[in-house]
Image (spheres, grey):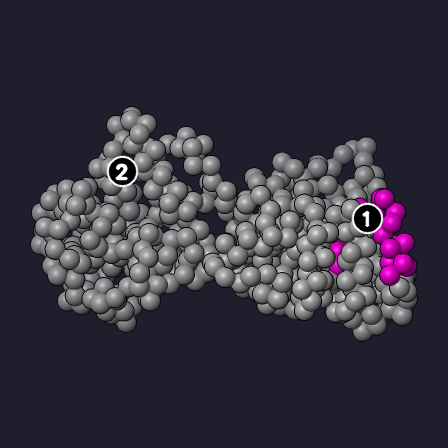
Amino acid sequence: MTEVLSVAQMYHADRAAMALGMGICGEALMEAAGQACAEAILVRFGVRSVAVLCGPGYNGGDGFVIARLLKKAGAKVHLALLGEKAKLKGDAALMARRWRGKVAVLDEDVLDGADLVVDAIFGAGLTRPVTEPARAVLVEAEKRALPIIAIDVPSGVQGDSGQVLGFAPQAAMTVTFFRPKSGHLLYPGRGLCGDLSVVDIGIPNDVLSEIQPQTWSNQPSLWLPVWPPLSADGHKYSRGHAVVLSGGLGKTGAARLAAGAALRVGAGLVTVASPKSAVAENAAHLTAIMIDPWVDAPGFRRVISDPRRNAVCLGPGAGIGKALRDNVLAALGLSKAVVLDADAITAFAKSGAARKGLFRNLHDNCILTPHAGEFGRLFDDAGDKLQRTRHAAAECGAVVLLKGPDTVIAAPDGRAIINTNGPPELATAGSGDVLAGLCTGLLAQGVPAFEAAAAACWLHGAAALAFGPGLVAEDLAPALPGVLAKLR
């Protein structure tokens, strides 16, 4: 399941499922949701004493079902409701009537004697901060170190953005339905969800054709089909020739990291375009990667003018200034596949005219790979991460990969992918240079920019996970063969 839904799309999925008939109605969906949650709780924690915290809406209705089924399984259940039972509506009111136990007022007393807490107070559609008494009870549950099982999302996490509205508890496990929402994958919501379980509640997959999701969780199935397989009669030129622009003397390491990654990921040839002053420094470290020296902008244009040199990476360690801007525009003017990272992004930030000139020349075979600081220098930083990245891609006309623990990749047409496999070990110097090189190596092989960015991001995370603790950037490319062997 790679599709990721918005809160509105999930509501649409519920309505579409009910419109299809097949015995699916609101009551059946709520019963199925509660049953799936109860089963997940029993599998993970067994029969324990449970405090079930119910809200005044449909999330609370799920809570009543969970309480009933856990009690039937032999658990000792204490249920508390935010609000009055008589004011519940629709299916939530129906499920409350089926609960034969006591309905307590929501306060801290409901936690006494509990081994677990089920948070069914607010769902993903919450739009206002969590206030008392719900906040006080959730805070107390955390103080008592009680495992919290969140239904849909931890109360207080906004389902689209992953942002916290006032307060949200740390869940041990979150159970959601049909497909994850973007708030499950974006921080801080992702961190607060604990282990995420996406359960089937009977909504048919056919409703996706009506919803037409534009966001996905990054998985190989999204991009492997457009990654050309190795061919028995292929040769190095058929696998593309990547060029990486090097910085000057003493600032060459970032380009070599990118170049090594481009070669490892499958580019047939890789050349470091080195300032003449840094040729000896680069040559001391490179073997399979070639070096082509240049002195000025016309010289760099000559380096990349060979039509076989089809993908260019600019930015890692390149320095900031007019020379770099000229080199970027030269690569774009030759219609090369281009990756702009680090300095190649910042170089266009201070001048509005330069920024407009960059956007005029970018095209759909370009990838920009900013971290949050670089992104803010070039684009509007308003909105959640998914919104910001989508707006940036639409504005500049290129694929934008906004790095972080929840990297988002967006295309100008609105498609977006959220990456979920990046471990904390990737927060190390040079890691981003390797990512830029992976993007470039995939572009050189003819992978479209959106899929190349997604594949590079996933491979980056998979290589880091394969290596494990103690990772430094130089370890990433050598870890790739094992990852690639499993994929191929």
Find the magenta span and give its range.
297-314
Q: Amino acid at mark 1?
A: Leu
Which image quarter: residue 368?
A: bottom right
Q: Position of residue 256 (x, y in %)?
A: 77, 62
Mark 2 residue element:
helix
Using a 10 Å C-alpha cutoff, classify the residue at mark 1 as few (fewer than 14 neighbours), some (14 to 19) or many (20 or more). Answer: some
Quadrant of the image containing the C terminus: top right
Q: Position of residue 351 (x, y in %)?
A: 69, 67
Residue 421 appears in the picture as rendered: no
What is the distance, in whole Å, between disc 1 and disc 2 at their CAs?
55 Å
> Residue 254, relative to residue 479: is it above or below?
below
Q: Position of residue 313 (x, y in %)?
A: 75, 56
Mark 1 residue element:
loop
**Residue 299 in magenta stretch:** yes
Mark 1 and mark 2 in contact? Answer it, CB < 8 Å.
Answer: no
Residue sitting nearer the eye, 147 or 427: 427
Q: Position of residue 461 (x, y in %)?
A: 59, 55
Q: Give residue 29's mark.
A: 2
Using a 10 Å C-alpha cutoff, classify the residue at mark 2 as few (fewer than 14 neighbours), some (14 to 19) or many (20 or more). Answer: many
Q: Residue furthest front?
A: 353
> Residue 65, relative to residue 466: is it above or below?
above
In the picture, measured across the screen, residue 45 lies left or right of residue 326, that is left
Q: Give residue 334's mark.
A: 1
Residue at image position (41%, 53%) is 160
Residue sitting nearer the eye, 484 or 2: 2
